[in-house]
């Protein structure tokens, strides 16, 4: 198979000297603006398969600065991307204009009402926010697996959910109010008594437009039915149009539309959430069943019996889990063929209540056609071991991939009665398109599954294979009346398919919403909405082999919250990214670029 030369990232229309002066006039401390090549390259990489190299990186420190930077972006004719944790998987956190860091100076938290509410800035990780709530026996509703690295800003931008929260405790449903900055610079606090009057006075066209769109969605039986059907599931595809049915006042409408908008409508500088109780008593079991059908058939009875979590692992996932030294004798000794497993957990607020629920569930568990493992354990170490098998799948598959390939983690949701057929269809697509190492796992209780495959984007044939697989996957999911994105956000990966999922009428509503909020199209263009049918195949990241010590890195960013130099020079992810960029420059024969990257690397990645 012929391979293309590994390209250096494109830096279109660079104007670093003029741009730097403009951006430095927008912030209080000009040292927080950088236009030098190595720092821009280091900041460009995120957890997605896309790579957009910004022309400047700015660490904003206030809502006023963000508003000024939006105005600066309009003046420069450049797009602006807001970035916090950079753990997004679909390309939401990168852009080729101005990249605004809203993590470094945005880490304040205020616990309210004895922990029943909490006010958070976007730079805190979910785990850090929950640490502040733990003493009150409370936590945030969304519980993404990436909680150690994903931030509150990303949680809002992607409408995060997770393993336990379902649709009722996601970011959208637990958000009480937001303070947000519109591209015009207008700041709105939706929790203020005069929020709607302020929006009407400062943004009359936007206010009137939201009323018009609200009535358009509500008055159309077809549009209403589509919104109700899609948002009965976990759904982060496109804008959160359920807001038009759930809320009436334009300021409240807009605050809820910000949830899941992926930085395309405005900047959320502060969020107040209603929290949920921590359930300290839990019992967990790994139920291994003969196949996918048996696993999904067991779900209704398990959920009716009180199971709060039911995580699905397909046969390929089980084979990966068997390689883990802590997998246990029963799983290691199993000859996996068409098996599937459910990681089931029951949790309650008291030991007595857990005992009652577990006793009532015991007959249900005993009636399952399980190959092995119907006993529940309350031992914390054993429960941690079982959860490690599930949470470790991503790193296990990604770490074992062939050097030079990218790990892709996608997620979908379908109605529960179509889950088995959809999973079997996915497995058929893996076979048809030659993805032998692909795995399926996810939140079966919600009809939400993730699938992971490894992909090489450095040859035309490989990119074409991925395009064919994606087209077939879209057909499969939409034929099942599902959603192409359940948790991870639309991003660039699924933006070309939003119109197909929602239809022309609702797609036009989304387009008008974007125009009303961001008439200059400054914020994250190409993310969430894109009329180019091949947009998801452009600007894909090359991952050259550099050294066995770092080749397994998937640039997930989990290292960054605990890195002592994260706010000073570079993080482990950025150091690895710089090594890869140097390798790309060498392959492209770009000696000037290589020297510039290497000259800075000594201090930014080694000395510091």
Image (tube, helix red, strand yellow):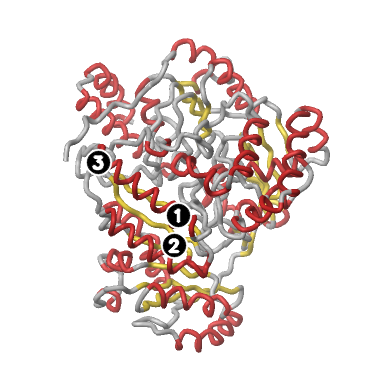
Q: Quadrant of residue 136?
A: bottom right
Q: Position of residue 47 (x, y in %)?
A: 40, 43
Say which mark, if any, is on residue 411: 1
Q: For the point 63% across and 43% down, which residue is it?
A: 505
Residue at the spot of label 3:
461
Whether 22 is drawn above or below 313: the answer is: above
> Marks 3 and 1: which is nearer the front?
3
Q: Quadrant of residue 62?
A: top right
Q: CA distance from mark 2 to mark 1?
A: 8 Å
Q: Earlier in the sequence, mark 2 or mark 1?
A: 1
SS under mark 2:
strand
Q: CA distance from mark 3 to mark 2?
A: 30 Å
Query: Can residue 360 be seen?
Result: yes
Q: Earlier in the sequence, mark 3 or mark 1?
A: 1
Is residue 97 toward the left or the right of residue 220 in the image? left
Residues at circles 2 and 1 in contact by the CB criterion of under 8 Å: yes
Residue at the spot of label 2:
442
Q: For the point 67% across and 45% down, which residue is it?
A: 256
SS under mark 3:
helix
């Amino acid at each position: 198979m012929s391979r293309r030369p590994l390209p250096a990232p494109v830096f279109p229309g660079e104007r670093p000297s003029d741009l730097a002066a403009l951006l430095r006039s927008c912030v209080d401390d000009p040292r927080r603006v950088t236009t030098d090549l190595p720092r821009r390259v280091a900041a460009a990489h995120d957890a997605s398969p896309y790579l957009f190299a910004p022309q400047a990186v700015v660490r904003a420190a206030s809502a006023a600065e963000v508003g000024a930077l939006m105005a600066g972006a309009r003046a420069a004719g450049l797009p602006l991307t807001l970035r916090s944790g950079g753990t997004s998987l679909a390309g939401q956190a990168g852009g080729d204009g101005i990249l605004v860091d809203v993590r470094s100076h945005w880490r304040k938290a205020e616990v309210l009402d004895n922990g029943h509410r909490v006010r958070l800035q976007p730079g805190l990780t979910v785990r850090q926010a929950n640490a502040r709530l733990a003493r009150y026996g409370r936590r945030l509703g969304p519980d993404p697996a990436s909680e150690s690295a994903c931030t509150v800003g990303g949680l809002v931008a992607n409408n995060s959910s997770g393993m336990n929260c379902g649709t009722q405790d996601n970011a959208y449903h637990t958000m009480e109010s937001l303070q947000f900055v519109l591209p015009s610079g207008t700041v709105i606090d939706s929790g203020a008594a005069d929020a709607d009057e302020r929006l009407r006075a400062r943004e009359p066209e936007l206010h009137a437009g939201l009323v018009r769109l609200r009535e358009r969605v509500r008055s159309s039986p077809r549009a209403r039915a589509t919104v109700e059907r899609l948002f009965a599931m976990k759904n982060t595809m496109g804008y959160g149009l359920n807001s038009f049915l759930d809320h009436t006042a334009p300021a409240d409408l807009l605050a809820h539309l910000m949830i899941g908008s992926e930085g395309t409508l405005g900047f959320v500088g502060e969020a107040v959430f209603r929290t949920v109780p921590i359930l300290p008593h839990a019992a967990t079991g790994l139920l291994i069943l003969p196949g996918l059908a048996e696993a999904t058939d067991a779900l209704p009875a398990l959920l009716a019996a009180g199971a709060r979590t039911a995580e699905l692992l397909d046969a390929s996932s089980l084979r990966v889990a068997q390689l883990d030294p802590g997998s246990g004798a029963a799983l290691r000794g199993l000859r996996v063929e068409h098996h599937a497993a459910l990681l089931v957990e029951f949790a309650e607020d008291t030991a007595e209540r857990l005992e009652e629920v577990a006793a009532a569930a015991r007959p249900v568990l005993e009636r399952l056609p399980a190959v092995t493992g119907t006993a529940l354990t309350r031992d914390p170490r054993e429960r941690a071991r079982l959860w490690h098998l599930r949470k470790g799948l991503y790193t296990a598959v990604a770490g074992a991939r062939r050097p030079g390939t990218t790990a892709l983690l996608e997620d979908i949701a379908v109605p529960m009665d179509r889950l088995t057929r959809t999973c079997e269809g996915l497995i058929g697509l893996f076979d048809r398109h030659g993805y032998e190492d692909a795995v399926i796992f996810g939140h079966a209780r919600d009809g939400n599954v993730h699938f992971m495959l490894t992909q090489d984007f450095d040859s035309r044939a490989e990119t074409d294979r991925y395009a064919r697989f994606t087209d077939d996957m879209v057909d499969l999911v939409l034929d099942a009346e599902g959603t192409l994105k359940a948790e991870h956000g639309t991003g660039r990966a699924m933006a070309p398919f939003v119109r197909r999922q929602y239809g022309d009428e609702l797609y036009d509503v989304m387009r008008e919403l974007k125009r009303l909020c961001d008439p200059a199209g400054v914020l994250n263009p190409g993310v969430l909405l894109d009329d180019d049918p091949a947009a998801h195949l452009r600007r894909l990241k090359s991952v050259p082999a550099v050294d066995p010590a770092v080749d397994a890195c998937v640039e997930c960013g989990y290292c960054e919250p605990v890195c002592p130099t994260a706010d000073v020079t570079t993080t482990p992810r950025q150091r690895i990214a710089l090594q890869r960029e140097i390798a790309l420059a060498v392959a492209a024969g770009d000696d000037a670029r290589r020297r510039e990257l290497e000259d800075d690397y000594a201090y930014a990645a080694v000395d510091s």
